[in-house]
Amino acid sequence: MVQTPDRRTVRLAYGPEDLQFGELHLPGSRDLFPTVILIHGGFWRVPYGYSLMTSLAEDLANQGIAAWNIEYRRVGDTDGGWPSTLLDVALAADYLRTIASGYSLDLQRVVSIGHSAGGHLALWLAARPRIPRDNILAGSRLPGDKYEKSNTPLPLIGAVSQAGVTDLEMAWKLKLGSGAAEELLGGSFNDVPERYHAASPAALLPLGVPQVLIHGTEDDRVPFVMSKAYTQAARTSGDQVALIELQGADHFVLINSYSEAWSMTVDALRKLLHLE
């Protein structure tokens, strides 16, 4: 990494709950920053948290890209799971509108990046305009909340999935994470199919923005075949999707900021942000 002495990090609350916060990593040498929303994985469960992505956020800031590294309520937290986990991520994304002017964030160049379950959420953020307006996931606030929200999702210009859980129905069928999708959505696909349809990027295609999927062939947590199948479906739907196949790579090398996998991810990101 190239160290930037005047780079700074600010912790901000995007909502009133303890886990509704993020760390904004800001570069020190650009007037208006392209911005990345970073979303950690962990099969949507505690105890996995935002610190998994901290080194990636620092690296992006060193390269002149603002990184909004968010936390959210997960299965095992109070009120975690359906629908709070998804709505927290939506609220965190929309919160960028509130802070953009104060921190010189370029809202015309926002891309989401997520790893594993965070890859699901990164693609889902791009898919939000496809969710019917009467669905509970269409906004960014739980019914009855008084905290400010937006009914219009923050537009993204791209999304990056790092070994992401791109298809929740497939995740349920494969019993990934010992039933993690069923825990997130509060039931099986047979029980609550409407939740899977509203929460799964694969069910919401086409997303309408360029997407990059990067995945190792030796991933034993989320199989490579999931990204391959999603890519084929997304291209058939008309989306622009690049699949980066990492021969012999495992699940976690993607969040090693010193790895070739991360360098390849940043190269793809820079193209999405029109920095190349």
Image (spheres, rainbow, N blue to C red):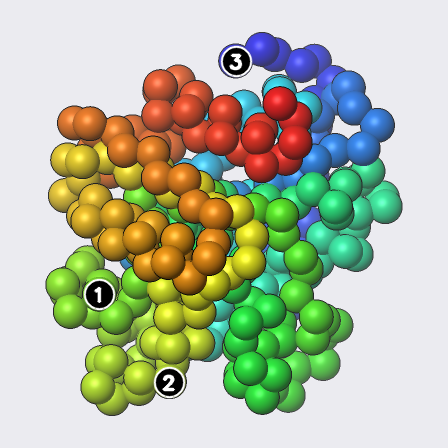
Circle 3 is placed at which residue position?
1
For the residues marked 3 and 1, what is the alpha-carbon distance in whole angstroms? Answer: 37 Å
Image coordinates of residue 239 in percent, x first then y, are 47, 54
21 with respect to 119 (left or right): right
Q: Amino acid at mark 3?
A: Met
Q: Secondary structure at mark 2?
A: helix
Kind of residue at badge 1 = Met
Name of the residue lying farthest toward the top: 2
Q: Earlier in the sequence, mark 1 or mark 2?
A: 1
Q: Which residue carries the number 1 mark? A: 170
- Residue shown at 34% from the left, 34% from the top: 244
Q: Quadrant of residue 33?
A: top right
Give the side of residue 12 with respect to residue 45, left or right.
Answer: right
Q: Tag 1's secondary structure?
A: helix
Quadrant placement of the C terminus: top right
In this picture, residue 150 sits left or right of residue 71: right
Q: Is residue 45 depicted above or below 78 in this figure?
A: above
Name the residue: 27% across, 33% down: 245
